[in-house]
Amino acid sequence: MRKTLLHYVLFSFLFALVLAGFVYASNPVDKKEYVTITVAPGDTLWGLAKQYEQEHHMPPNEFIRWVVDVNHLPSPRLAAGEQIVIPVLKSKQGGSVAVNQ
């Protein structure tokens, strides 16, 4: 009886985690709400994280992960001329924090 209850609780917990993952994944970032920039020669994600630090208030590694995920970049390397979305809300540019993905 006790093992059955344990299995039920464990299964319920795992099911809830999977369900939460699907809900989280189905709520993509609306790129239109965020600032789009054109990458200049020599730009790096680390440098952009530092440059826009006052607008996004994220640690650099979190900024980089957000940009790579939202822009579906194959790697954190940037090419001059490409346009990327950064975690700075257009409505809050120069102001508050952008919400994390």
Image (cartoon, grey):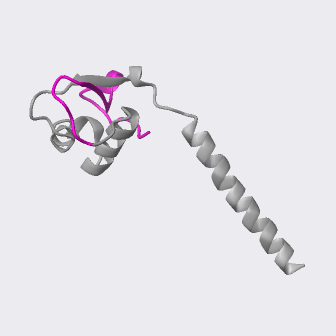
Residue drawn at 78 percent across, 73 percent down:
6
Q: Residue 54 placed where, x, y %?
A: 22, 38
Residue drawn at 81 percent across, 66 percent down:
8
The quadrant of the picture occupied by the C terminus is top left
Q: Residue 60 placed where, x, y %?
A: 25, 48
Residue drawn at 13 percent across, 27 percent down:
40
- Between 26 and 41, the one lying in front of the other is 41
Q: Report the side of 28 relative to 71 (left or right).
A: right
Q: Residue 76 placed where, x, y %?
A: 26, 42
79 part of magenta stretch: yes
**Image quadrant where residue 53 sits:** top left
Q: How many marks?
A: 0
Q: Residue 95 placed where, x, y %?
A: 27, 30
Q: Report the side of 73 relative to 44 (left or right).
A: right
Residue at the left extreme?
A: 42
Residue 100 to residue 9: above or below: above
Q: Report the side of 97 relative to 29 (left or right).
A: left
Q: Main secondary structure of the magenta part?
A: loop
96 part of magenta stretch: yes
The quadrant of the picture occupied by the N terminus is bottom right
Stretch of the chain drawn in magenta: 76-101
